[in-house]
Amino acid sequence: MLFRHYLLSIVAFISIFSATPSLKAQTLLPYTPELNGEFLDSYGAQLLQDAVQLMRFREFDLALSRAKLSVQLSPNQYEPWFVLGTLQIQAGETEAGVKALQEAKRLAPEDSSVLFSLGNSYFQLGDYDSAVKELQAGLKINKEVPQAYFDLGNAYFKLTKYSEAISSYQKAVKLEKEFWPAINNIGLVEYEKGQNNKAVESWRKALSIDKNQAEPMLAVAVALYNQGKKAEAIQLGKEALKIDNSYGDVEFLKENLWGEKLLADTAKFFQNPDIQPLVGKKSPSSQE
């Protein structure tokens, strides 16, 4: 499971900028006001507030254009860079987003949300060492963010530092008991360590929190199939793929951090005649 959440603390910006003084309109025309620094910062703040509001309504393209202009008008404020970087990552412009977040970090090196977003971005670029560094730096400032521990666990997992990964996931769950993606990923790590029974326990625990999650359900099915419990495995596998057939795509599973051992066993499971017809078909839930 690669649980992406890029909009950390962004909505809080609304309250930050809601106190911005309104600009007085000029009554004499034609008139072009001199764009001094105070004006630019004020207008840039208004644009950023607009961008945040548009983000709330998932109007990301419109939000992105306003964030870019806000950066031009207020380049010495970290908030526009933070919002811009977040939106660029949301749009798949990861390298540009990282550069914007790096600038936000330069302007506000002690802001944990910037560090968390930057760490998440490095992860997407495949720079797992840098991801760990930024996430750890953020957690030194704010230790109460489950998502940050989850992202740190994912980075450790990709670095095959399994003990550190499990410890990070456990910290996420300690802060948020029903954070099932972290419990699910503990199972992914355990399976790669050869602890198949413990992995099944973790996945069943994730399902006890949300019984309709396709990923832990399919993982349990694969593990049971590998243990020779084929009838139960096939039943669970069918149900999982009907919930979300995206998990019938091996590349999608790789993106969601399924390791080599689990993928190898999944490939065998997908060859079962009862499962094979469901693999590769797009269900309505997977197309949303």
Image: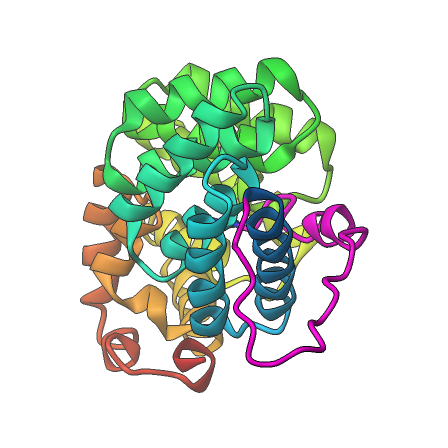
Establish if 248 lies above or below 135: below
- Estimate the x, y position of residue 117 in percent, counting from the top left: 48, 38
Please tell me which residue lies in front, 18 or 11: 18
**To which quarter of the image does residue 194 belong?**
top left
User: Is residue 11 covered in magenta?
Assistant: yes
Position of residue 149 in the picture relative to residue 237 (left or right): right
Location of residue 88 in the rendering, given as x and y in whole percent from the top left corner: 37, 55
Q: Residue at x 29, y 68 (%)?
A: 248
Q: Is residue 275 above or below residue 22?
A: below
**Closer to the camera in the image, 110 or 80:** 80
Chief SS of the magenta region = loop
Q: Position of residue 199 (x, y in %)?
A: 46, 36
Magenta segment boundaries in residue numbering: 7-36
Query: Image quarter for residue 48?
Result: bottom right
Instruction: Say left or right for 265 vs 241.
Output: left
Q: Is residue 230 left or right of residue 112?
A: left
Q: Residue at x 61, y 81 (%)?
A: 29
Question: What is the x, y in percent for residue 273?
Answer: 22, 76
